[in-house]
Image (cartoon, rainbow, N blue to C red):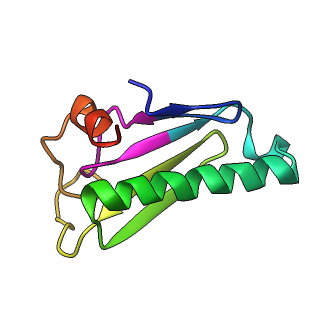
Amino acid sequence: MIIKSNDLITVKPAEMPLSSGHVVMYLHKRVADMSVSELFELAKDLKELIAKMKRSYRPEAYNVVLWDDKIEVLPRWCGDMSFNAFYGLKTTPQTPQMIFESYR
């Protein structure tokens, strides 16, 4: 289930979503190896993804986690924290397919 793909990224729903709408931007090149223009395009893709997330989920905030080979984007809402052992976030019943459909 690919939400978006281009020369720099492939965006897919997270395999184990931590919140409704959690997506992963898989980078085709490591961040350290990207040129300035590629980083600019990556930032534009990230902004576009967050705009779609805003329309679909109406979150109050976002967590954007930059790894060397991927970027995870998690929508956040007031009160979504829990004291469980799974990264401190409430787990949701939303499946990757449901996340994919919400970004269409």
Is 77 placed above or below 90 here? below
The quarter of the picture where residue 12 lies is top left
Q: What is the chief secondary structure element of the magenta stretch? A: loop
Is 42 placed above or below 1 here? below
Q: Is residue 9 left or right of residue 2?
A: right
Is the C terminus in the top left, top right, bottom left or bottom right quadrant?
Answer: top left
State whether residue 66 appears in this view. Answer: no
Q: Is residue 23 magenta?
A: yes
Spot occupied by residue 88 in the image (x, y as percentages of width and height)? 26, 60
Question: Depth check: 14 or 51 in front?
Answer: 51
**Residue under the image location 69 percent in, 36 percent down:** 8
Question: Depth check: 103 or 89 in front?
Answer: 103
Question: Depth check: 7 or 16 in front?
Answer: 7
Total number of numbered labels?
A: 0
Spot occupied by residue 86 in the image (x, y as percentages of width and height)? 25, 50
**Residue under the image location 48 percent in, 49 percent down:** 72
Spot occupied by residue 87 in the image (x, y as percentages of width and height)? 30, 55
Q: Which residues are magenta?
A: 12-24
Question: Depth check: 69 or 60 in front?
Answer: 60
Is the N terminus in the top left, top right, bottom left or bottom right quadrant?
Answer: top left
Spot occupied by residue 38 in the image (x, y as percentages of width and height)? 79, 46
State whether residue 67 appears in this view. Answer: yes
**Residue under the image location 60 percent in, 49 percent down:** 45
Q: Residue furthest top?
A: 1
Q: Is residue 58 left or right of residue 67?
A: left
Q: Is residue 74 magenta?
A: no
The quarter of the picture where residue 63 lies is bottom left
Q: Is residue 90 left or right of residue 16?
A: left
